[in-house]
Amino acid sequence: MKYISIAFYLLVLTFAPCRHGAFAAEPASNADIETLRGEIAGLRSEMSAMREKYETTIARLEAQVNRLGSGTCEPAAPMLQSAQVTSSPADERERLRLVAAGALGAAGLETTTGATPSAQTVTFKAGELGQQALNPEISMTGDVIAQFRSQEDVREQARGTFRSLGIHGECYLDPDTRFKASFPIQEEGTEICEAYISRVGFSKDLNLTLGKFHQQFGVVGRWHQHALDQVDFPLALRRLFGGPLEQIGVSFDWQLPAEKGMGREFTLQLTHAKNDALFAENTRGIPCLLAHYKQFKDLDASTYLEWGVTGLTGTNDRWNVGAAPAISIHDESRPIYALGFDLTRLWEPTDRMRYRNFCWRTEGYYLARDIITAAGDRDTARAWGAYTNLHWKLNRILESGIRLDYYRPDSKPYAAAITPTELYPNALHMVSGHDPYEFQVSPYWTWSQSPWVHYRLEFDYRKGHNMEQDDRRITLQCIWAGGPHLHDRY
């Protein structure tokens, strides 16, 4: 309205001198003209003051933007000055609150928008009471079996075993390093199953792992026992290696460039050779070397294919020569070689992956161990085995499958026949030419009560030639997991 009045007065002044024409106005008095001039002068003065104020404000804002851009802005100062102006010296608590607000600045408090300093709502923040966020994630697993057995010359026919109470921990030590550990508590005692750190991005496409871990010999050798699809590890893996290779060392994992649409990975592990089945005569502590190469590809939206090869080498250096009581020690380094092959094909429809899938997995193992015989001669014991596993997911909670195992040890004429089951560096204690071998058939069914509790029923039939007596077992298994990791494979 003020600017409309100004415009009106200007029009009056413009047309006031006109005395001729149809629209000529009446002459204005001197008093009216002086009044109008005074109002115009006041408006000019007010507009000049507003322009000066705006220019000052813009200059201050530009200076603050420049300070923020250079990182030299001190946001606490204006707040503190405002607090000093508006605070009352008589109110000690209010004064201290405003001083603290100015000292903390924007990083230490939250204020209500548009409020004066005396009406600000200040929220003090500190992290000392939130240290539980630094604790590792801890999970626990339980593995209990009840087994019924029928085997000639074996008196025990049933037993219950609490195989392990597993304690699993995991946390990130920093953005690039992750720590994982697994401690199975068994009836015989407790040991470290795995405890290692993984450095992600150690270099381009390379991850580094340090500690004790299950080595990457094949596929299932990397898994924990409670996370298997069956009750136990494959027969050949148990016969040749005594189970999974758990050793201390370093692992380098490379993500290689894709080739012909297939992803590729290469793993190289250098570990302390302490596996009793392979390196019982390694007294010098010479490490063993393992290499694993893997390729994988999505054949279509629902089918996945993976295959890999593994090689392991190490040495043994001390041998017992002769027979009791005239046993002598013979020192000589003899190599040991192990080879493996694995193939996995998984069909899992993307729209029904929680209800249907089919997996075929097979692995083969070969072991050649150079030895010094009891007669002091050099020889090589060779053994091999394999398994194939068919696994179906029938619906969301029910799975079924069958595993076929085969194992063929070596036989030597110099191996003393102590018992039909003991092995002499992977050579059967049996007269040469008896063609020893054994196979096992294991159908199983798994019911998942929930993602945390699984029940399994398995039947194992093992038959051998010049080895153990036929063995039949029915196993009931219950596995449960509590914590964020559920039934992690490794």
Image (cartoon, rainbow, N blue to C red):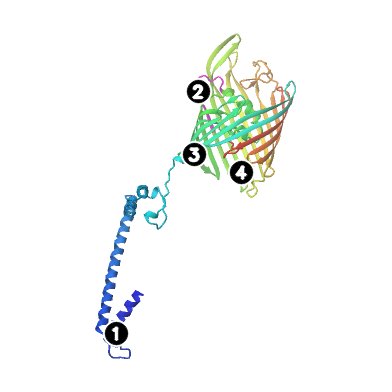
- Give the spatial CA distance, label 3 vs label 1: 83 Å
Looking at the image, tell me whether mark 3 or mark 2 is earlier in sequence order: 3
Q: What residue would you read off at disc 4?
A: 304
* 3D distance between C-alphas at marks 3 and 4: 40 Å
Asked if 260 appears above or below 211 in the picture, the reply is below
Q: What residue type is disc 2 on?
A: Ile
Which label's residue is closer to the chain start, 2 or 1?
1
Q: Name the residue tied to disc 3.
A: 132
Q: The residue tagged with tag 1: helix, strand or loop?
A: helix
- Residue 286's tag is 2
Q: Which residue appears farthest toward the front when viewing the image? A: 90
Residue type pointed to by label 1? Phe
In the rendered image, residue 284, in percent from the top left (x then y), is placed at 50, 20
Are dots 3 and 4 in contact, CB under 8 Å? no
Distance between the alpha carbons at the discs numbered 2 and 1: 113 Å
Say which residue appears at 40% left-offset and 53% top-offset. 120
Q: Percent x, y for residue 160?
A: 69, 28
Q: Is residue 281 magenta?
A: yes
Residue 211 is left or right of residue 186, and the answer is: left
